[in-house]
Amino acid sequence: MTARAGICTTILAVSLAGGLAAQQRSAYEELQTFSGVLNHIRLNYADSVGYPQLIQAAIEGMLRALDPHSYFYSRLEAERLDLIQRGTLAVTGITLEEVDSAVTVLAVASQSPAAKSGVQPGDRLVSVNDTSVAGLSVNTLELRLAGEKGSKVRLRLERGPRLEPDTLVISIKRDVLVRRSVSVVRMLDSITGFVRLEEFGPDAGKEVHDALGRLDHQHMRRAILDLRGNPGGIVTSAVAVASEFFPKGTVVFRTEGRKRQVDTTYTTGHDGAFVSLPLIVLIDEHSASAAEALAGSLQDHDRALLLGRRSFGKALIQTGFLVPPSGEVLMLTIGHVLSPSGRFIQRRYAGLATEQYYALAGNGGTAEDTLKEYHTDHGRIVRGGGGIAPDAPLPRPAPLPVWWSVAADSGFDNAVADSVALSLPATPAARAAWLTASDRWRATLLPRFLSRVRTRLQVPAQTDSALDVRISRILAARVAEVRWGPDAYDDLVVRSSPDVEAAIGYFPRLRQLLAAP
């Protein structure tokens, strides 16, 4: 103890004496310090350790000190990512994000293997193939979830409160997904169109244009654009989508960075085909990145009314840099996205611990960030500070308990729904009647499903009225798909959505709500 105290005192004295000099150290001297520490560790550390391990840890530490979203791919990881993007490797349909220091499901692609297995946004990933995810980055884990088509990956997930979570284990069969930005296009009634935008892929602008064109031919006079669960994508695709709703030359958003070439104002390149179309946009806590940029632009220009829940709060410009000599890839944050009114969409990370940063996901920024007021074109007050707050908040859906996902992974939902589906006539009249028969869903499907769950899983499977409605709706959609096809499934899911029903109710007051205060 005495010897150790003496050493520490000596180091402290030297440190204080050299304090002023340290403030004036050159980059070369800093690198010399790093090299010296690295060499001492390699030569003198109690356990054997090599340069690759130390350098990898140093790189990860540097990036973590910058922001939570810059990352480094090894050459093997970069090659694997390229195979996923080209559709050569099969996937689960899960998008991950670190939230409150836990690897969390940000989005689940509709009709994907993960969706069919009952995985829900907000689930926390604990292990992959019985190997803990502790210490692994989101990017590494997303690569591990991919594999050969038809192969299975075993996931352990947590759901519910962090202190007393429910746990489920499911096996997901990987599949190659056909990635389309627009997944659902519908007329909800004689005048209301609906477009669901799943992500901002390379053809998102064209897909939205074509979807709205189809609805226009069906006499659409107003529209709902659904961005719920949209994790983002290509920034220029967000501009292309915005161009459908704005005149030429409208500022969609700006990007700012340390380098001058990053400072860019993105504007629409042509007059949109749907500039005067009354528009309502749905967002939620899983709308992120490019989805938030588009939503903020439509809100700032009073072009659309935003309904739902505050968005995720992630809007950074990132680009990849090839790192010689072995071909690793550095994905580095080079700029921030600002809405037309000047709002930062990205929630604060400077000065916050990683755990603090992720704890703010979908909940706004720190208090001081939300005090500043910005104004829309008509003078309505909006605020920054992390994500985009809707003009009209909507309640969250009833959370699905863990026994629901276990039952779905076991096929209990399909067994009940399929038997009911086969008892229904395959006629258009029967289809139309089923789509709106919510009382019939609960009476026909719910008791049989809950009975099977309680018997097979030996759990109480307690529900309330809100959960009854949600489970009945999911089962009814499965019935519609089996009896009348995927189109009927989409019809039921959209038409019975509480958020969509609420949006339709806001249209009569849309002009008033977007007007100057």
Image (spheres, rainbow, N blue to C red):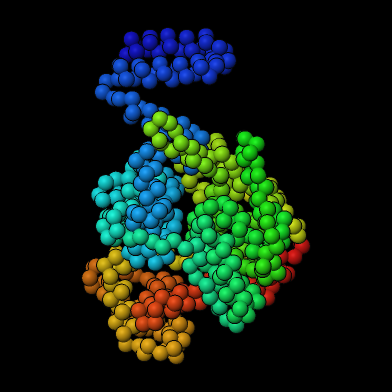
Q: Is residue 466 left or right of residue 24?
A: left
- Quarter of the image holding residue 87? bottom left
Q: Is residue 135 left or right of residue 435?
A: left
Q: Position of residue 476 (x, y in %)?
A: 39, 78
In the rendered image, the vertical position of residue 333 relative to residue 113, given as above or below? above
- Whether residue 385 is visible here, answered yes or no, is no
Q: How many dots with numbers?
A: 0
Q: Residue at x 69, y 66 (%)?
A: 275
Q: Residue at x 33, y 28 (%)?
A: 52
Q: Residue at x 43, y 11 (%)?
A: 11
- Quarter of the image holding residue 214? bottom right
Q: Position of residue 382 (x, y in %)?
A: 68, 54
In the rendered image, the vertical position of residue 320 relative to residue 92, given as above or below? above
Q: In the image shown, does 505 or 260 lie closer to the viewer?
A: 260
Locate the C terminus and report the quarter of the image it occupies: bottom right
Q: Residue at x 36, y 46 (%)?
A: 80
In the rendered image, the vertical position of residue 110 relative to residue 313, given as above or below? below
Locate the N terminus and report the quarter of the image it occupies: top left
Q: Position of residue 125 (x, y in %)?
A: 35, 51
- Whether residue 25 is visible here, answered yes or no, is yes
Q: In the image shown, does 469 or 271 lie closer to the viewer?
A: 271
Q: Is residue 511 left or right of residue 403?
A: right
Q: Position of residue 169 (x, y in %)?
A: 28, 57
